[in-house]
Amino acid sequence: MSKRVFSGIQPTGSIHVGNYLGAIRNWVQLQDEYECLFCMVDYHAITVNYDPDGLEQRVLDATATNIAAGLDPDKAIIFLQSLVPEHTELTWLLTCITSIGALERMTQFKDKAARQQQIFAGLMNYPILMAADILLYKAEFVPVGDDQLQHLELARELARRFNGTFEDYFPEPKPLLTSGARIMGLNDPTAKMSKSIEGSYIALAEEDDSIRQKIRRAVTDPGPQGGEMGPGVRNLFTLLEGFADESIVEQFRRDYADQKLRYSDLKSVLADAIVEGLTPIREKRAELLAKPEDLKEILYDGSKKARKIAKVTMEEVRDIMGFRLPIK
Ligand code: TRP
């Protein structure tokens, strides 16, 4: 059997070219090499203030966008976390072997908690749910960005703690550090591209005019400075590498080295390349969203497959932890 890969996808906000070049494109390739599970993590999405009436639409939107960008329900299991109740069940069991100190040390928790008036336990326990996501399927690899490495380390620690306390059962999931590009904000190339900062990102569903406008306005620098490329221009080159042919990228690199590069030319070619790359994704996404029942069917179907695996794990874990009366 091929090795199993698990990743969680937050159903929040606009999915942008940073997510696409940094993560989704890699997942698309992984589908051919591994048994992949891609989970829409709606339970993670409620750890901060959210609108219950918009949740379903956000799930469908994230599902449609990821499928339009190349995730394939015929190759991977694409499913919804809240349709597989074993995720919450395992979370509780793992919660009982997690030290509060480890949770309080999570940098993402510290950052998010600093912005909340009232800090709910769900925000702190978020990484336990993430560990349950992964361990439920005994996933071998987890493709993660560096912002999630600390959470993955906790999942590894919980696997070890479980194995040491009860019996050797969970494999330790390993990070799959893929070669995804790190895309910076267009308006501030010193910070990562972010869906919560207008002007920073280009959504995968962005209209052509808006793409061109955002690229036109993207921060560059006053000009080549002693061969040192500024962060804004470097970011535009990274985007160009993601969307244009290598020959075009090389031509612009030569122009830059020869101090002949005009940023307006770079921007116009880049905008064309992004428009060309995103148009089919935007169209496919719209097609998928026009048939919400079909999208739900994809999620139900994937969740059924996921649950089959999850149920076996939960039965074994319950037994190992001493819950010997099986659920009838
Ligand atoms: N926390 C991850 C993020 O914000 C999403 C996620 C939830 C996840 N469960 C996961 C990622 C399991 C990898 C594996 O991006």
Image: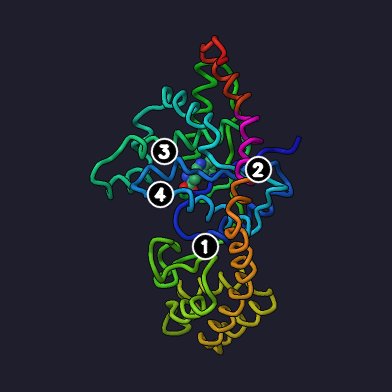
Q: Which mark is residue 206?
A: none
In the image, is 8 to the left or to the right of 120? right
**Depth-wise, is mark 2 or mark 3 nearer the camera?**
2
Asked if the beta carbon under badge 3 is closer than 8 A to the nearest atom of ligand 1, the reply is yes
Marks 4/3 in contact by CB < 8 Å: the verdict is no
Q: Which mark is residue 126?
A: 3
Cα distance, mark 1 to mark 2?
Answer: 23 Å
Q: Residue at x 68, y 48 (%)?
A: 73
The residue at label 4 has a CB less than 8 Å from ligand 1: no
Q: What secondary structure is marked by label 3? A: helix
Q: Are marks 4 and 2 in contact (CB under 8 Å)?
A: no
Mark 2 and mark 3: Cα distance apart in space: 23 Å
Q: Secondary structure at mark 1?
A: helix
Question: At label 4, which amino acid type do we have?
Answer: Asp
Image x and y of residue 104, in percent: 33, 36
Q: Main secondary structure of the magenta part?
A: helix
